Image (cartoon, rainbow, N blue to C red):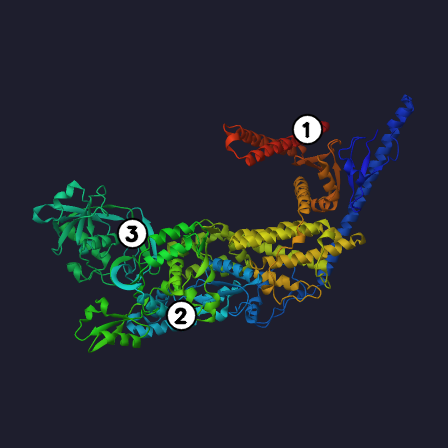
Amino acid sequence: MLGTRFRVLAKPQSVYHLISNPIKLAAPSLFRHFHIKTPLQSSPANKAEMDGGHEDPEKKKKKEEKAREKELKKQKALEKAAKLQQASSSSKKSEKKKVKRSNEEEDNPEDFIDPETPMGEKKRMSSQMAKGYSPSAVEKSWYEWWEKTGFFVADANSSKPPFVIVLPPPNVTGALHIGHALTAAIEDTIIRWRRMSGYNTLWVPGMDHAGIATQVVVEKKLMRESQLTRHDIGREKFVSEVWNWKNKYGGTILQQLRRLGASLDWSRECFTMDEKRSKAVTEAFVRLHEQGLIYRDNRLVNWDCVLRTAISEIEVDYIDIKERTFLKVPGYENPIEFGVLTSFAYPLEEDLGEIIVATTRVETMLGDTAIAVHPGDKRYQHLHGKHAIHPFNGRRIRIICDAILVDPEFGTGAVKITPAHDPNDFDVGKRHNLEFINIFTDDGKINQDGGEFAGMPRFKAREAVTEALKKKGLFKEAKANEMRLGICSRSQDVVEPMIKPQWYVKCTGMGKEALDAAIDEKKKLEIIPTQYTANWKRWLENIRDWCVSRQLWWGHRVPAWYVVCEGDNPDNFGASYERWVVSRNEDEAQAQASKKYDGKFQLIQDPDVLDTWFSSGLFPLSVLGWPDDTEDLKAFYPTSVLETGHDILFFWVARMVMLGITLGGDVPFTKVYLHPMVRDAHGRKMSKSLGNVIDPLEVINGVSLEDLHKRLLEGNLDPKELAVAKEGQVKDFPKGIEECGADALRFALVSYTAQSDKINLDIQRVVGYRQWCNKLWNAVRFAMSRLGDDYVPPKDVNPDVLPFSCQWILSVLNKVISKTVLSLELYEFSDAATSVYAWWQYQLCDVFIEAIKPYFCGNDPKFESERGFAQATLWLCLDSGLRLLHPFMPFVTEELWQRLPSPRDHKRPTSIVISEYPSIVERWTNERVESEMNLVDSVVKSLRSLAKESRERRPAFVLCRTPLDGEILCSRQLEIETLANLSSLTVISENDAAPTGCVVSVVNENLSVYLKLQGSRSIEEDLEKIRKKMEDITLQQEKLSKAMNVAGYKEKVPDKIQKANAEKLDSLEKEKLSLEEASQHMEAQISSEQ
């Protein structure tokens, strides 16, 4: 007897078959979906049974022969029909190609090209969307329109809540590098999101005068063009030359930031040395001095002998030397040897013999004023209070006891002390009231205190002193020694610790306030990521006073004047701290000095300038008009967030907080977001000598390998370094860098921020996002073709009447909006970018757009209502999705959004820039629909996996072990067939005979899918995969069972976890049983074929 067959009536377009055995039905609730199909005729077997089972053998033989002949004819007919069908199909394809080619020939190429847009006007777009995405075409003209229209300008009188970011001011000498690009990408994402969310956003652009960097650039230019130094032309003329250079070449980077799409308020652009900022710097210095927070002292500084100035610690690069190493040093023809520890002896007074010391800087012994030993070291107890004699000048050198500095187990246990040229020795000198003898001139030569070595460059003196010690029999040995060497990042000179009179800012009290702001229970300042709070605490708890003097000509001149009285020795200029007068200008200084000094005197301004970090530390205040009580200052201070690299947390961020609290009365910002440092794809620091420096504009516009090589020639690399750099470029960019556009670069950089410490930037990832922009472009292009030229979207949609796939996409759109906004609020930019990307890629493009294609296929009247609903939903998704993506990719989203039709009776904003950021619509959320789509998706993925790369439409079967799953899958036939590319889908229950001639996959413990075999595909291969999966499950079971059976499991493990483990174990067992069933089915197929 034949099994009854059922056909699904729910969806008329596709046919579902449910195979079931007689009487036994797995899911009675499904009856309403099927009707019984009566067999059209009885089989011969049944007829024989009805005749009593008796048949003549001869007749039987004749019948069998006729049946064979009939089958043969049938087979021939089928083969002939197949050939005819193939020929017809080929002809149709050929006709389609001809039609397509003909249509393409009819297309007017000019329809796909954007007309020229006058500067500052709204972009004029092509009448037809281009067939592919071109970054240069899409990103053209929009920015100029945005800027001219004033979308980026903040209003100090607005009633909207303020949201303010101050751009970390790039150096005026700078060109856009990848760190700037990362900063701009992150900050613009924040600002665009907040602007669209209803905030009065202000993003202030500015430039830093970059004292040392700018002076070096102009000095090199002067030498190259005129063979003159700054000293040759004098201070006034040199400063004039720097201003000329700044006005001609400075600010290039701000133009480059526009190319990245940075929506800065250019009406508030500022420069750290413009009139307003200079006024703020002077006022800050005077106020801090009046509060006793600025003072002058003679202390040790990092001195650059080439630049002849003190430099900041951040301008010192440290290199670790493991062994004897020769390095090039500016001003020396031959390389200088480092990593050598020289031991020599000092003769002792009273014929007490000698004491041996060691140093890596033997020339500094010319400034030694003591020898330190540990008070508990018995070897030297008889020398306490005694003296050694300097071998070159006869100076008596005290032997002192210092338990802080000296380790008796290290070396000889005796340490030479040079207070004027070593940080540790400086502290010893202060503790023991030693003499501080400076032995160097500002340009690194030995001065008059060096006796016979005077006038020698310091490293020439190193050799000479060593030879002189040998002649006197005091040299002991020279051996390799590990050391850390400080190199100036600007001049590449070896940094020399030198004692100099400088201006200092007292930092202990201000540092305590800055520390408390970030760690108090009611903290005013949040540092993100939180791991850097520990660094903040460590630095501020150990803060030292800040040297703000720089011996440069370019910068803010120190607002201090020295009173020179009649008869003063010019060599003693500045020596008396009491003679210094700090004032806002010279007239004020004259008035102050007149109150203290009678008779004739002269005021001479300090020739030094202030550390660049001093003016940049005031930036959040000064850009808003401080010290004047401006409308901007009242409306926008404190700012909202400071975003910068974690490497300047102390040098800039901490100083801004200290100065903001002290001078502005509050923290300058409430949040600090610290981005990672950008490295190359291999994790290496970017370096010109490695050839791995990435220029953002070359990524945006594209660059050939040849042009990358040419850029290397513009540097100062020696031939060996040049060869290494070229080799690195060939390896990393064998075909150069293809044009990626600003949107793709921005999105890649923001996506990378999950790597909180370092970003290993792989350009191929940027290329991948550029390709994704093309997918985005084509998805919108396809959608626009489905909407039609005259489509007008409705003002609203009722999700309750929408088709299943439309309900689902709106529900998951709600989810991505919620996730994106939450991630942005938490400064988890990578998560936000990933969420938006995943919705567009995997839900809108891969599922929804594919699922609704049947509604538009041939304009079938059966789908008229579904078609209308799908259009409305599609428009909603494009509009919301583009607005959701806009902060990350401003150019392509503006271009595509402008092409969308506007809703009826609703005036859209003129630009997506000022449109509203999407927010969740509660009635769109539908957990049931999402759950059902998850089930559909799991079935589709399994079927696609079985189909592999094949696009041939084939029948498939789904074995449902629960009635609910069966009901859901029966009702979602259209979606499954469409998404899995099936010719038909049959739902079967556990009691049904398993389909034959199929490959099988287990979806989960409740579902298995079968797909008809294609051609010569091997069942054995799929069977092996199932066996492998069974082995994996067995291992998981064993591991979980072992964990659940350890001693104390029930007592120690929370009930919630125990329950989850038990459920997991049960699920694994069910899945394993399903796999065993599938395995047996496939084994049976293999046996039947053998």
How far is mark 3 from mark 2, CA to CA? Answer: 51 Å
Q: Quadrant of the N terminus?
A: top right
As shown in the figure, which amino acid type bears the numbered disc 2?
Answer: Pro
Q: Quadrant of the C terminus?
A: top right
Q: Quadrant of residue 53?
A: top right
Q: Quadrant of residue 100?
A: bottom right
How far is mark 1 from mark 3, CA to CA? Answer: 74 Å
Q: Nearer the viewer, mark 3 or mark 2?
A: 2
Left/right placement of residue 218 relative to residue 845 reads: left
Q: Is residue 310 visible?
A: yes
Left/right placement of residue 26 relative to residue 761 reads: right
CB under 8 Å between discs 1 and 3: no
Question: Badge 2, how many Cα within 10 Å: few under 14, some, many 20+?
Answer: some
Q: Which residue is mark 3?
A: 326
Residue at the spot 46% in from the left edge and 49% down from the top edge: 682
Classify mark 1: helix, strand or loop.
helix
Q: Is residue 735 visible?
A: no
- Eyeballing the image, is 387 above or below 123? above
Q: Which residue is mark 2?
A: 627
Q: Which residue is mark 1?
A: 1080
Query: 260 or 1039: which is nearer to us?
Result: 1039
Left/right placement of residue 958 relative to residue 148 reads: right
As shown in the figure, which amino acid type bears the numbered disc 1?
Answer: Gln
First-in-chain label (3 vs 2): 3
Classify mark 3: helix, strand or loop.
strand
